[in-house]
Amino acid sequence: MSRETAERRGLLIILSSPSGAGKSTLAKRLMEWDPSLQFSISATTRAPREGEVEGKDYYFVTQADFRKWVSDSEMLEHAHVFGNNYGSPKAPVEASISAGRDVLFDIDWQGAQQIQKSALGSHTLSIFILPPSIPELKRRLISRNQDDMETISKRMRKSWDEISHWDGYDYVLVNDELTETEEKLKTIIRAERMRVAQQPRLLDHVRKLQTEFEEDA
């Protein structure tokens, strides 16, 4: 662990956007940029898609298990999306930020609000990604070839509901050009890591300065 990481508290970095705006690609690029970032693995009741790995992409759980986790307050946030439940297990997130590791969330506005209002809210950094246009959003959904047209239509209908919550975030970026958006994200994260709330040792340092000042008086 680096000196910088040991001396600061981890951030809960939230990325949200309507489906197809690019948040998953940006999250992947951030992980490549800084391997110390820990991706929050969500639990979901939906079936795995081709190529998805248990414990790496998601924790695939039954409806009964998911409800128990929620009732036992073991979820930091949870939401019902497109007929399935999604949520972020709380314990690994708390352990990571206490150890000075940032945790990256790829979640919707409902989950973002729950985390922002939680006991960990003061350590969150929330960023919303907007598409450059609605036609471009639809083109991206079609070109990624993950869903049938009926599902794409559902995602498009839901997109405005997602976009309408843009003003509940700390930062909002228009993802017109992917590399440029990526660089803006890196700049934001670098700055937010230096937030006073993220540097628990500052108080000890100020007390040391006060003692030295009084001894020198």
Image: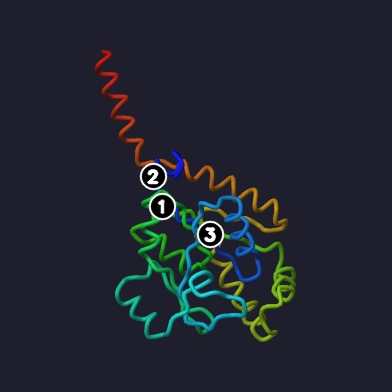
- At a point 35% along the width and 41% down the height, the residue shown is 200
Q: Disc 3 vs disc 1: Cβ atoms closer than 8 Å?
A: no
Above or below: residue 39 compared with residue 216? below
Under mark 3, the amino acid is Asp
- At a point 67% along the width and 58% down the height, the residue shown is 175
**Is the image coloured rainbow, by chain, by secondary structure, or in one colour?**
rainbow
Looking at the rendered image, the quarter that the N terminus falls into is top left
Under mark 1, the amino acid is His
Answer left or right for 185 relative to 86.
right
Answer left or right for 78 relative to 180.
left
Q: Disc 1 vs disc 2: Cβ atoms closer than 8 Å?
A: yes
Q: CA distance from mark 2 to mark 3?
A: 23 Å
Q: CA distance from mark 3 to mark 1?
A: 19 Å
- Of marks 2 and 3, which one's residue comes earlier in the chain? 3
Residue 203 at x, y percent in the picture? 32, 35
Of badges 2 and 3, the one in the foreground is 2
- At a point 44% along the width and 51% down the height, the residue shown is 101
Residue 17 or residue 92, whichever sits in front = 92
Residue 92 at x, y percent in the picture? 39, 62
Residue under label 3, please give it: 167
Mark 3 residue element: helix
Mark 2 residue element: helix
Q: Disc 2 vs disc 3: Cβ atoms closer than 8 Å?
A: no
Residue under label 2, please give it: 197
Under mark 2, the amino acid is Ala
Residue 102 at x, y percent in the picture? 46, 53
Mark 1 residue element: helix
Looking at the rendered image, the quarter that the C terminus falls into is top left
Above or below: residue 24 compared with residue 2? below
Structural crowding at the residue carrying mark 2, measured as other residues with C-alpha within 10 Å and reported as few (<14), some (14–19) or many (≥20): some
Residue 30 or residue 84, whichever sits in front = 30
Residue under label 1, please give it: 123
